[in-house]
Image (spheres, coloured by chain):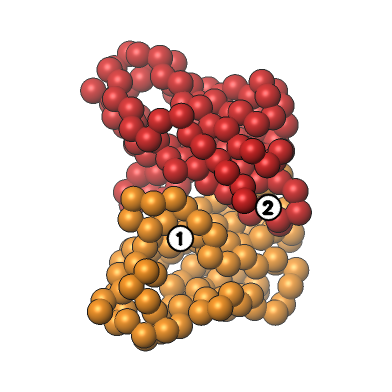
Amino acid sequence: AQTVTQSQPEMSVQEAETVTLSCTYDTSESNYYLFWYKQPPSRQMILVIRQEAYKQQNATENRFSVNFQKAAKSFSLKISDSQLGDTAMYFCAFIWANAGKSTFGDGTTLTVKP
Amino acid sequence: DVKVTQSSRYLVKRTGEKVFLECVQDMDHENMFWYRQDPGLGLRLIYFSYDVKMKEKGDIPEGYSVSREKKERFSLILESASTNQTSMYLCASSGGTRNNEQFFGPGTRLTVL
């Protein structure tokens, strides 16, 4: 079975600073995708960034980037120039390439302070 | 844009009642999922479906069943609700060329008294 571990239940960061959320996973699969999702307070879960396991280049989406270390099974999310709207719970997710079945981490609650 | 809708945002039921949670997606996605979200436990997969009338158990299927009679609709059924099924339930769908990205509904907060 796949496991996803987010070791930081809560984090905080000052507005405009950079923060990194950690995620490690365990799998014997070779073909999969990794995602970071964001769930703002009382709002819908939305995608932040995705990474295909077969790609070595780290994904980037504006202020969001990942550090994907496949051998170490690590997939951290870096948020640059943090904004108040980044306050949310962030989930790391492992999704099988074939069936789409997924395993999510327990989440990290990020608070951006003014 | 993909839209995933869930029949209720809040639901209150009594122990022993049969509960239906409905989910509809409008993007012709093959895959649909039901999760429950509890504090400190993240999202746990209950069931998923990769085609009409097809279903597979997730990590915590006990006490739940599902139905997928049409491609766009995926129902979660609690045959006899219990207080330990009080939770937030999230539906999601995926498919097409978006690398298995899952699109989520707004969630249903179910309270079983």
The relative height of residue A82 versus residue B58 in the rendered view (above or below) is below
Which of these two is toward me, A105 or A19? A19
Residue B111 seen in render: yes
Outermost residue on the front side: it is: B1
| Location of mark 1 (residue) | A38
**Where is residue B19 drawn, in percent x and y?**
41, 19
The relative height of residue B96 versus residue B20 in the rendered view (above or below) is below
**Where is residue A90 drawn, in percent x and y?**
43, 62
Q: Residue at x 61, y 77 (%)?
A: A60
Say which chain is red: B
Q: Secondary structure at mark 1?
A: strand
Q: Secondary structure at mark 2?
A: loop
Q: Residue at x 50, y 56 (%)?
A: A46
- The subunit carrying tag 2 is B
Which of these two is toward me, B48 or A13? A13
- Residue A96 marker: none
**Where is residue A59 drawn, in percent x and y?**
64, 75
The residue type indicated by label 2 comes to Asn
Say which chain is orange: A
Residue A102 seen in render: no
| Location of mark 2 (residue) | B100
Please indicate whether residue A58 sits to the left or right of residue A84 in the image: right
